[in-house]
Amino acid sequence: MEKLQIVGGNRLSGDVRISGAKNSALPILAATLLAEGVMRVGNLPHLHDITTMLELLGCMGVEVAINEDMSVETDCRHVKSCVAPYDLVRTMRASILVLGPLLARYGEAEVSLPGGCAIGSRPVDLHLRGMEAMGAHVDVLDGYIKAHVPGGRLKGAHIFLDTPTVTGTENILMAAALADGRTVIENAAREPEVVDLANCLIAMGAKIQGAGSATLTVDGVETLHGCSFEVLPDRIETGTYLVAAAVTGGCVRTRNTDPLLLEAVLLKLQEAGAEITTGDDWIQLDMTGRRPKAVNIRTAPHPAFPTDMQAQFVVLNAVAEGVGTVIETVFENRFMHAQELVRMGADIHVEGNTAIITGRAALSGAPVMATDLRASASLVLAALVANGTTDVNRIYHIDRGYECIEEKFQQLGANIRRISG
Ligand SMILES: CC(=O)N[C@H]1[C@@H](OP(=O)(O)OP(=O)(O)OC[C@H]2O[C@@H](n3ccc(=O)[nH]c3=O)[C@H](O)[C@@H]2O)O[C@H](CO)[C@@H](O)[C@@H]1O
Ligand SMILES: C=C(OP(=O)(O)O)C(=O)O
């Protein structure tokens, strides 16, 4: 199995190019199932999850071509199967995003039920209730969601989400785009990736109002056409490199990104003592020679502090001056990185959904094991600042969400390499 070997202690400096957002690219690729014509999607990150989604589309009969500029063209004219098999879904929960498009366009879907994972139970009940509210019959049988639409076309509905689920909102939005009549989604997720999907659907001919607010209004159309769309920059990858600069006392400029996507994160970095400067498509963090100050964090749906940046800020607090409290309100079990960080010398006490972290002047290298995507990223950050060598094992999680992570960190001056076997 591959691992990342990191020798800590180098101050990071220089520029890093941010990739397209995984969490925007995945729903947009699923949305290509809705198009009558050819779709072109650009600024796709080179990640395992993207390959999995393309494989999933391919096994349904979607023709997928990769262009020289690494954009992807999809053609859904010969879709022959509406099944998302367990073998693909088990490697990527976001496969559930094909449910809405399949029901809306083909009137049937058989999608393996995604399992629980290292960050919480992650049910999909709100996705299913949304489809039922639009007239689908849904059964869960033999580990599969088996759904069909009597009459063939979903109907617009008034849907209130108990919690503003991101992929749930996206699934319902895609289904509603081709439904008969008006759908109103209340308590909708407001994440930038939901807005990006809405913009893509609008470019395909959908009628959507309210993207970025808690109420989405969708007037269903009969058909959607192909279009060319560029995925927005990855705010979580951006934030991860900025925290890397902060913990190593470095100075890093993230390029091809958008400061407006991560206001809550930038505020916390400033509170930690970082000097932040921004342009239209770049963010620079300068911490040269200084140690961060501990900050208190409470994760919550957008525009509040994102849960996908929580683990990285636990590391920031672990090496900061003072005591920081991190409260995780989105997922019930997202502190798996804490035990591993303690093995590197961090002082972290977890009680329920709260971690109390007392900053230490130094961490020490150790063999550690990644349990989920952002937990893995946090271990890499800790390793970059620790004394000595750290082996981060089970890095397949990291390749789901970070494009060329070792090359990008090497460019910034880190001592990091991938070891096979
Ligand atoms: C591919 C993708 O975009 N993944 C992101 C998405 O995941 P994902 O869309 O899976 O996360 P959700 O927004 O759905 O989850 C938020 C909360 O709602 C609960 N819930 C969700 C659906 C449901 O039917 N019932 C229910 O109870 C979940 O258990 C969780 O406690 O948003 C999360 C929250 O910002 C991010 O951490 C993930 O990176
Ligand atoms: C939890 C994440 O992703 P996913 O929803 O794909 O598991 C993430 O990106 O941090």
Image (cartoon, grey):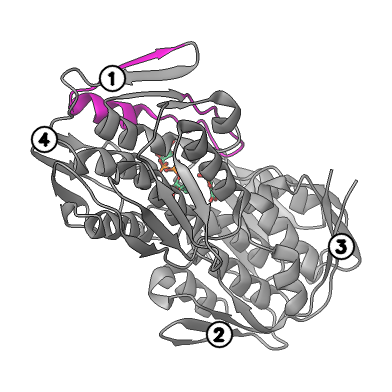
Sequence-wise, the earlier of marks 4 and 2 is 4
The residue singled out by tag 1 in the image is 148
Q: Quadrant of residue 61?
A: top left
State the separation of the CA atoms marked 4 and 1: 16 Å
Q: Position of residue 71 (x, y in %)?
A: 49, 62
The residue singled out by tag 2 in the image is 284
Residue 390 in view (yes/no): yes
Near-viewer residue (49 or 376): 49
Residue at the far left in the pictured view: 181
Sequence-wise, the earlier of marks 4 and 1 is 1
The residue singled out by tag 4 in the image is 180
Q: Nearer the viewer, mark 3 or mark 4?
A: 4
Near-viewer residue (93 or 155): 155
Mark 1 neighbour density, 10 Å: few (under 14) some (14–19) many (20 or more): many
Q: Give the amino acid type for the residue marked by disc 1 in the picture.
A: His
205 vs 358, left or right, is: left
Q: Quadrant of the C terminus?
A: top right
Sequence-wise, the earlier of marks 3 and 2 is 2
Q: Which residues are magenta?
A: 112-141
Tag 4 secondary structure: loop
Indicate if the residue with disc 3 has its beta carbon within 8 Å of ligand 2. no
State the separation of the CA atoms marked 3 and 4: 60 Å
Tag 3 secondary structure: loop
Mark 2 neighbour density, 10 Å: few (under 14) some (14–19) many (20 or more): many
- Residue 40 vertical placement versus 273 (above, below): above
